[in-house]
Image: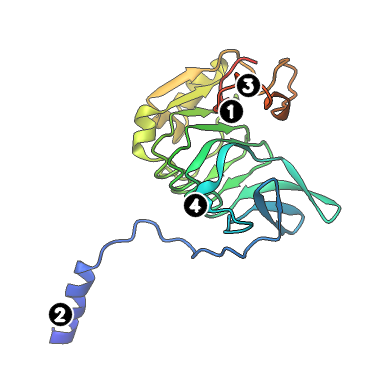
Amino acid sequence: MNTTKKLVMLLALMLPVTAIALPPYDYDNYEFEVDGIYYKIEGDVACVTFQRYASGMHLSDYHGDVVIPSTVTYQDVTYPVTTIDYYAFNYCQGLTSITIPESISTIKDCAFYLCTSLTCVNLLTPTVVIEKHAFSMCSALTTITCPLTTPPAMYYEDCFDSPHYESATLYVPASAVESYRNAPVWKKFVHIQAIDPEVLPGDVNGDGEINYRRHLGRSNQPECRCLQRW
């Protein structure tokens, strides 16, 4: 082996391995904004896309309890919201709780990467695919609520970090606890508990109707509404 080949091999061994290989940031990859969430239209559906520095807002200033809508209207056309794109809420350090509606089918790589104040995830969609590193480095994540009797599909085992599986609590319907304990990825959670009462978060009457905004004015309401009895 000649000297050049030996040098190339040595350099390859010395280079650090990149754990997350994703597309570069594209802060202009959006078409419109509604209530602080940015979207782009893909065919006949809408995608929650990259946050950007706009109107004086910094990514780390995005805060509080966020509910992604099932539909959004742009130029007089209403689109279902089906995807949360790469890096959509990346580094939103003030984000404390996220509610993902039933319309979402895919949460892409690093969608909530480094959301270090995120404590609660409400996952209301039955068909979601959560890609790798979607919730990586969310060091405060303690509660995941999934009020679905059939565990959602999750194709990547590393969509959550290992500490989440050991410390966070997964809340599911009482009738589905065993299903989650035997489902890929979900069974990795050490703490799986039944939702009490067994209704969807925000369903105050138990009638299948969810209305989060009607409760936002209550002064005694905690920031994380994952499992509160209304």
User: Would residue 111 be seen by someone viewing this image from the given angle?
Assistant: no
How far is disc 4 from disc 2 in space, using C-alphas? 36 Å
Disc 1 marks a residue whose amino acid type is Thr
Q: In which quarter of the image is the C terminus?
A: top right
Q: Earlier in the sequence, mark 4 or mark 3?
A: 4
Q: Are marks 4 and 2 in contact (CB under 8 Å)?
A: no
Does residue 10 lie above or below 96 as drawn?
below
- Secondary structure beneath dot 2 equals helix
Disc 2 marks a residue whose amino acid type is Lys
Image position of 168 (left or right of 14) = right
- Secondary structure beneath dot 4 equals loop
Which residue is at 62% across, 58% downward? Answer: 54
Where is mark 3, residue-wise?
219
Which residue is at 60% across, 21% downward? Answer: 221
State the residue in front, 94 or 206. Answer: 94
Where is mark 1, residue-wise?
150
How far is disc 1 from disc 4 in space, using C-alphas? 23 Å
Q: Earlier in the sequence, mark 2 or mark 1?
A: 2
Badge 4 density bin: few <14, some 14–19, many ≥20, Cα 10 Å: many
Badge 2 density bin: few <14, some 14–19, many ≥20, Cα 10 Å: few
How far is disc 4 from disc 3 in space, using C-alphas? 35 Å
Front: mark 4 or 3: 3
Disc 3 marks a residue whose amino acid type is Ser
Q: Quadrant of residue 163?
A: top left
Image position of 230 (left or right of 177) = right
Badge 3 density bin: few <14, some 14–19, many ≥20, Cα 10 Å: few
**Residue 166, image x, y percentages:** 34, 29
Which residue is at 58% across, 58% downward? Answer: 52
Front: mark 4 or 2: 4
Where is mark 2, residue-wise?
6
